[in-house]
Amino acid sequence: MYDVNSQAWEACPSMPALLKSSTASSWLSVAVAGEIMHVTEKHSGVTYSFETISKTWKGPFSLRPHESVFHCVTGTLGERLMVAGLIGKVGNVKGVKLWRVRGGLGSGMEEVGEMPKEMVRKLFSGSELGSVEVTWIGDFVYVRNTSEPEELVLCEVLNHLNGVGCEWRSVRN
């Protein structure tokens, strides 16, 4: 790990074995919240957290919100750890949902929103499921299927008096 204060590299413990065997970005999702880096195996949702202050790995934790989720991508909105999940199975995506992780890992998740079905069909209408890219910026979540590059779906995560919600939009690329 690079220490910006000392301008030197410091040795840290190796990644847990599950993550080392899945080192490609197509299999892992990385999210940083504060001083903690969360690394998630996308298929299983198994997550380990690296605490940069103590230089220790914690976990495993499950960030697979439901057994119907076959692909999980983690990210942060503000300092909140979030999960985007594809529901169904490869070749038959039935939905996309967003969850917010409550408190610390292992404290459960709260569903924030679900992509409208017509947008799911636009993103995953082809016979091929490419690499699903999820980008988290500010209060926005961008979702795209690399096999359907002409379609981009975005969600603005809104804080309401009665909780958190989503406003979904589809953009032609």
Image (tube, rainbow, N blue to C red):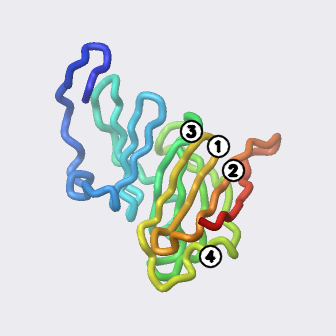
- Which of the numbered marks, if any, corresponds to residue 122? 4
Q: Earlier in the sequence, mark 3 or mark 4?
A: 3
User: Is the residue under label 4 in contact with that under label 3 (CB below 8 Å)?
Assistant: no
Furthest toward the front, the residue is 173
Q: Residue under circle 2? A: 156
Amino acid type at circle 4 is Lys
Amino acid type at circle 2 is Glu
Quadrant, the N terminus:
top left
Is residue 139 placed above or below 45 in the rendered structure?
above
Residue 4 image offset from top left, x and y in percent? 31, 19
Real-space Cα separation, disc 1 to disc 2, in angstroms:
6 Å
User: Is the residue under label 2 in contact with that under label 1 (CB below 8 Å)?
Assistant: yes
User: Is the residue under label 2 in contact with that under label 3 (CB below 8 Å)?
Assistant: no
Residue 31 image offset from top left, x and y in percent? 44, 43
Real-space Cα separation, disc 2 to disc 4, in angstroms:
18 Å
Q: Residue under circle 3? A: 80
Real-space Cα separation, disc 4 to disc 1, in angstroms:
23 Å
> Toward the viewer: 115 or 149?
149
Residue at 46% across, 68% down: 146
Q: Nearer the viewer, mark 1 or mark 3?
A: 1
Residue at 51% across, 69% down: 149
Side of 138 relative to 9 (left or right): right
Q: Residue under circle 1? A: 139
Mark 3 surroundings: few (<14), some (14-19) or many (≥20) residues within 10 A: some
Side of 147 relative to 8 (left or right): right
Q: Earlier in the sequence, mark 3 or mark 2?
A: 3
Residue at 50% across, 47% down: 75
Amino acid type at circle 3 is Arg
Q: Nearer the viewer, mark 3 or mark 2?
A: 2
